[in-house]
Each structure stands twice: as C-alpha cells, then as structure tokens.
Amino acid sequence: QVQLVESGGGLVQAGGSLRLSCAASGRTFNYYRMGWFRQAPGKERELVCRIRRSSDYIYSDNPYYADSVKGRFTISRDNAKNTVYLQMNNLKPEDTAVYYCAADSKSRGVWDSWGQGTQVTVSS
C-alpha cells in the first residue's frame, strides 16, 4: 500500500489561497492516478479533482474538477518529487472541510490508498 502524507491545510479568510501537498511513497509514483477528496461535517466525502498518470486509458478527461471548484482549484503533480499539489484560490466558506489525498496505485480504477487528511477552514 502506498503511504500518503498531506500538508498545507489551515485557516484562511474567504477569497484567500492555500496550497496543499501530498507526498507519496513508492518508486512508481508516475503510474499512480492521484486525487483530492474532501469531507465537510455531516456530509459525505466527495471527489474534488483528479489527475491521471503518464498514460491513462480509463479517464478521458484530464484533469477532472468538480463543478464547485472549477476555475478556482488546480491539481498538479511533480513526479520527480513524488508529490501532488492542490492550489486553491478564491476560497469560500463552503470549501471548509478535511481534505484527503488518494491514490489509485494499481491501475484498477479504485482509490486504494488514502492520506490522513488535512483541515482547511475558510472564514467569512
């Protein structure tokens, strides 16, 4: 199983920005499909965005963003650093949640590895 460690969460005012990082273990990070999820209190975990691996035949859209974050969030990856990033701009109070990094490390279309989560709180 892949180890994932998120960082970069915190408290920010509405309209502000944060960048989350997720460092992954493993020698084949460039083959992992990576994603960011979030879970707000009382709500189900939802997919925020995902980015494919070097070659990907499952997803035709790359990267994918939930409608609620399109134009504000950007997912990127640095394969040399085994790290995926989530740049969040123009944050809104409704973005408040615990953000999780996830990996599909076996190319099965299943998120098989998860980070511990990092809290993002946006004040109005």
Image (cartoon, rainbow, N blue to C red):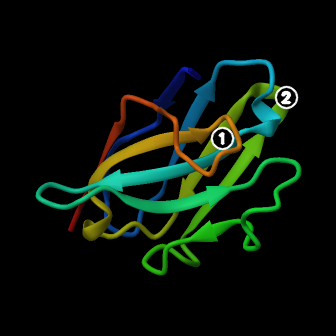
| Residue 16 locus on image (x, y percent) | 42, 61
Q: Nearer the viewer, residue 91 or 86?
A: 86
Q: Left or right? Give the position of 6 relative to 27.
A: left
Q: Amino acid at mark 1?
A: Val
| Residue 60 locus on image (x, y percent) | 76, 73
The residue at the point 37 percent across, 29 percent down is 116
Q: CA distance from mark 1 to mark 2?
A: 11 Å
Q: Left or right? Give the position of 56 relative to 26.
A: right
- Above or below, 120 relative to 25: below
| Residue 89 locus on image (x, y percent) | 51, 65
State which quarter of the image contains the C terminus.
bottom left
- Above or below, 31 relative to 27: below
The residue at the point 57 percent across, 34 percent down is 22
* Residue annotated with mark 1: 84
The residue at the point 55 percent across, 61 percent down is 49
Count up the numbered dots: 2
Residue neighbourhood size for the residue with mark 1, other residues' Cα within 10 Å, grouped as few (<14), some (14–19), many (≥20): many
Q: Is residue 121 at least partly visible in the picture?
A: no
Q: Residue 80, which numbered label?
A: 2
Q: Amino acid at mark 2?
A: Ala
Residue neighbourhood size for the residue with mark 2, other residues' Cα within 10 Å, grouped as few (<14), some (14–19), many (≥20): few
Q: Secondary structure at mark 1?
A: strand
Q: Extreme front residue here?
A: 108
Q: Secondary structure at mark 2?
A: helix
